């Protein structure tokens, strides 16, 4: 549409409620829910293990928020794990551990846990796979502890942690050079 002289243009403000506290999406017919949980003293690995016991019908992994840049990065890494699971080429014998290892960009389980695993008082992403009914039930339980997803920018942390230089970023012909470097590093883990 071209605007001409004497046309009336109405500007309608759109009120946006901000980012969601819960992401739900599909990858290869798998329903995935992601919630960012604010770090607290009582939330430790045993808390996550208790969630696994309480909700045995879902696959569940907690990853330090520092290691997830944005939704593009999140979906691509989960896609790698889903693809690896489907083709029996997981980095470990558990799908959930494959996700953690790929975000940590480590082929060593202990290294992945120590770097990208959860720590008390540190926010983390709870990545879950399952059916809608169970995911909704889980969200009812943990929703009160959730915070706005991707409210903090972890670009400088990830660049420093993985020693990615501006020169390397400049060499990548992409709209998302940092994300694409991280995804490529995660894809070539053996």
Image: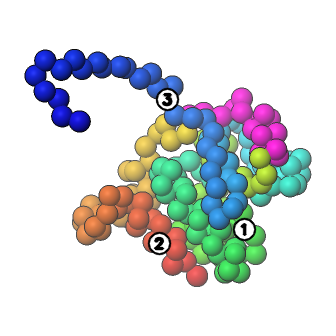
Residue that badge 3 annotates: 18
Q: Is residue 159 above or below residue 23?
A: below
Q: Position of residue 70 (x, y in %)?
A: 48, 49
Name the one closer to the observer, 120 or 143.
143
What secondary structure predominates along the stretch shown in magenta?
helix
The magenta stretch is 133-148
Per the image, is 147 magenta?
Answer: yes
Between discs 2 and 1, the one toward the N terminus = 1
Q: CA distance from mark 3 to mark 2?
A: 31 Å
Residue at 77% across / 58% down in the picture?
59
Between discs 1 and 3, the one toward the N terminus = 3
Q: Position of residue 87 (x, y in %)?
A: 68, 80
Please give left or right for residue 35 compared with residue 141 in the image: left
Residue at 45% across / 72% down in the picture?
184
Quadrant in the picture for the N terminus = top left
Residue 3 figure quarter? top left
Per the image, is 53 magenta?
Answer: no
Q: CA distance from mark 2 to mark 1?
A: 18 Å
Residue that badge 2 annotates: 185
Residue at 58% across / 69% down in the picture?
80
Between discs 3 and 2, the one toward the N terminus = 3
- Residue 95: mark in rendering: 1
């Amino acid at each position: 549409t071209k605007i001409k002289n004497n046309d009336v243009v109405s500007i309608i403000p759109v009120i946006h409620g901000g980012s969601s506290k819960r992401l739900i999406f599909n990858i290869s017919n798998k329903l995935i829910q992601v919630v960012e949980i604010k770090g607290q003293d009582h939330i430790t690995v045993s808390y996550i293990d208790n969630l696994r016991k309480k909700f045995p019908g879902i696959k569940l992994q907690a990853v330090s928020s520092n290691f997830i840049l944005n939704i593009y990065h999140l979906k691509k890494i989960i896609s790698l794990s889903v693809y690896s699971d489907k083709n029996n080429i997981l980095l470990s014998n558990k799908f959930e551990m494959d996700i953690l290892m790929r975000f940590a960009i480590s082929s060593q389980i202990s290294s992945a846990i120590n770097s990208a695993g959860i720590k008390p008082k540190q926010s983390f992403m709870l990545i879950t796979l399952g059916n809608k009914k169970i995911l909704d039930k889980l969200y009812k339980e943990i929703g009160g502890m959730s915070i706005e997803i991707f409210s903090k920018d972890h670009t400088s942390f990830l660049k420093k942690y993985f020693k990615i230089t501006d020169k390397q970023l400049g060499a990548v012909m992409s709209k998302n050079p940092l994300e694409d470097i991280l995804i490529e590093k995660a894809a070539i883990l053996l």
